[in-house]
Amino acid sequence: MTRFGVVRFPGSCDEVDAVAAAERVGEAELLWHRDRDLHGVDAVIVPGGFSYGDYLRVGAIARFSPVMDAVAAFAREGGPVLGICNGFQVLCEAGLLPGALLPNDSLRFVCRQVEVEVVRADTAWTCATEVGQRLSIPVKHTSGRYFAPDDLPAEQVVLRYAPGENPNGSAGDIAGVCDPGGTVVGLMPHPEHAVDPLTGSVDGLALFESVAVGVAA
Amino acid sequence: MAGSGGRVRARVLVRPKAGILDPQGQAVERALPALGFAGVANVHVGRLIELDVEDPAQLEAMCETLLTNPLIEDYEIVIDGAGVAAR
């Protein structure tokens, strides 16, 4: 059974939902930001929230916490890592993913269900989906405008907002990207909030199932 | 020029890199004419970081590793009584 580790920083707020989502497909436990090892988990989730108060820039301080050294080493060895929202921002600041997240073009907090399309169905976190599949997943953020570096390879785009769904002005409607190896993935939408019919969609479950399938294989 | 304890007062001016959409700057630029201030253009909103440092030579490394994200931001280092080092 896949063991997920979910990082908790001071200021995280979606780590409990991430644990609950991961527990639908495996086991999950919290990792504290001061932890220097990952307790032997099979996959790591860096969750949403406001790590270290979002001081300076979103994700800028969290990047230097002890647990991130362990996450970076885990990622270098090919371990699956998922960054959701603030977690995506942290992974970009840490250089584990390309690009950066800027304030929404509207300058407003957005909180709504969006449709995203799978661009790559062969990453560690999307292999249980199909290219072109639409997922209904909520976003809730103020700094979600993806800035793509000029040299971003097209094959590192994993998810795009469906036409007309881009909530923040992200370049190329990019909602999620991966590292060159396809094991580290970051996205602004919250798949952990879309795992139960009670909240309107179970489409987010596919991301957790993907890594469970990969670990079992 | 030297502050207390042999430290030097420095300011780091951070602004969005040219070409990156700056909605804060645009909002301010739109607001000024509405208040009767005409002839304003190229407004950008960034941030100011003030710090006392013993070794100003370390400022650039501080900017590159923590104080700014060079992918999306430009910065200038201003040292009290000295010149400006722009990047």
Image: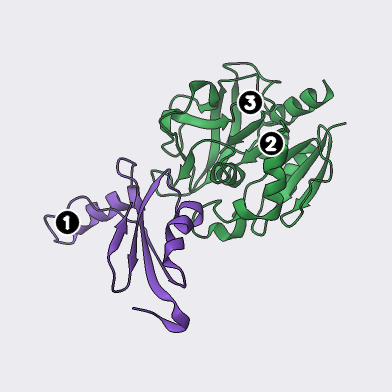
- Mark 3 nearby-residue class (10 Å; few <14, some 14–19, many ≥20): some
From the image, which quarter does the C terminus of chain A lie in? Answer: top right
Q: Is residue A43 above or below residue B34?
A: above
Chain letter of the purple region: B
Q: Is residue A23 above or below residue B47?
A: above
Name the residue located 55 percent from the left edge and 42 percent from the top edge: A92
Furthest-bottom residue in this view: B4
From the image, which quarter does the N terminus of chain A lie in? Answer: top right
The label number, if any, that marks residue A181 in the structure image: 3
Question: Looking at the picture, which amino acid does disc 2 mark?
Answer: Ala
Report which residue position mark 2 lands on.
A75
List x then y, in percent, for residue A12: 66, 54
Using the image as rendered, state which of residue B69 and residue A127 is in the foreground.
Answer: B69
Q: Earlier along the polypeptide chain: callout 2 or callout 3?
A: 2
Name the residue located 52 percent from the left edge and 35 percent from the top edge: A98
Q: Colour of chain A?
A: green
Q: Residue A99 vs residue B78: left or right?
A: right
Name the residue located 28 percent from the left edge and 49 percent from the top edge: B26
Furthest-top residue in this view: A131
Using the image as rendered, state which of residue A94 and residue B60 is in the foreground.
Answer: B60
The Cα–Cα distance between marks 3 and 1, rounded to whole angstroms, is 50 Å
Residue B67 appears in the picture as rendered: no
- Mark 2 nearby-residue class (10 Å; few <14, some 14–19, many ≥20): some
Q: Chain of mark 3?
A: A
Question: Looking at the picture, which amino acid does disc 1 mark?
Answer: Pro
Residue B8: quadrant of the picture: bottom left
List x then y, in percent, for residue A133: 60, 18
The label number, if any, that marks residue B33 in the structure image: 1
- Mark 1 nearby-residue class (10 Å; few <14, some 14–19, many ≥20): few
